Amino acid sequence: MTSTTLLLAGLAISVCFALLCHAFFREYFLASAGAAVVTSLTWQSLNYWHLGHLDPFFPIALVTGGVVAFVLSLLVGLPFARARRRHRVEPAARDRGFHPVVPSPMREPRTMDDPPTGSSS
């Protein structure tokens, strides 16, 4: 395999693990750290399988690969974090039974023909 193919395969593995971790873990940094650890261990396992022995510098490669995978996972997780933040309901609003997405069944929506509430006419 060429070095370009290995680089693309490593990036694909990183992105796949990042997508999986961010889909299953709600905590942004926990999902990123989990994806980095799993990605780095997978890279080293594949390297061991390919070479037949551990690389003498595998601890350095383990840490370096983990840092690169963590940064990539942070970037991949941004849309997940934004979507979760957008759909989060504040605790006080949850206690009142208010949810911004679902309209309240207790109140009829106003139309343009209805007079405004609280007017003194």
Image (cartoon, rainbow, N blue to C red):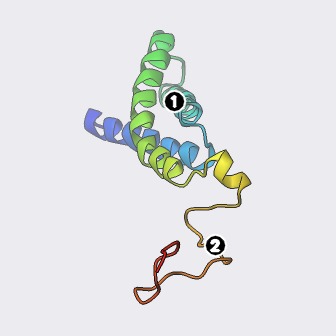
**Left or right of 88, for residue 91:** right
Q: Secondary structure at mark 1?
A: helix
In the image: residue 63, left or right of residue 94:
left
Q: Are marks 2 and 1 in contact (CB under 8 Å)?
A: no
Q: CA distance from mark 2 to mark 1?
A: 43 Å
In the orientation shown, which residue stands out farthest toward the bottom?
A: 113
Asked whether residue 35 appears in the rendered view, the answer is yes
In the image shown, does 37 or 118 lie closer to the viewer? 118
Q: How many marks?
A: 2
Which residue lies at the image location 73% right of the left edge and 52% below the top edge? 95
Q: Residues within 10 Å of mark 1 (few under 14, many from 20)?
A: many
**The disc labelled 2 sits on which kind of residue?**
Ser
**Residue 104: which numbered mark, if any?**
2
Identify the mark at residue 36; answer none if there is no mark: 1
Residue 37 position, x and y percent, is 56, 27
Between discs 2 and 1, the one toward the N terminus: 1
Residue drawn at x 54%, y 33% as measured from the top left:
42
Quarter assignment of residue 101: bottom right
In terms of secondary structure, where does tag 2 sit? loop
Give residue 61's quadrant in the image. Answer: top left
Residue drawn at 33 percent across, 41 percent down = 8
**Viewer-closest of 114 and 45:** 114
Of tags 2 and 1, the one toward the viewer is 2
Q: Quadrant of the N terminus?
A: top left
Residue 55 visible (yes or no) = no
Rendered position, 73 above or below 81: above
Provide residue 28's location: percent of width, then percent of height. Answer: 54, 36
Q: Nearer the viewer, residue 38 or 18?
A: 18
Q: Amino acid at mark 1?
A: Ala
Seen from this angle, which residue lies furthest front? 121
Question: Where in the figure is residue 81, as x and y percent of width and height?
Answer: 49, 44
Q: Position of residue 23 (x, y in %)?
A: 57, 50
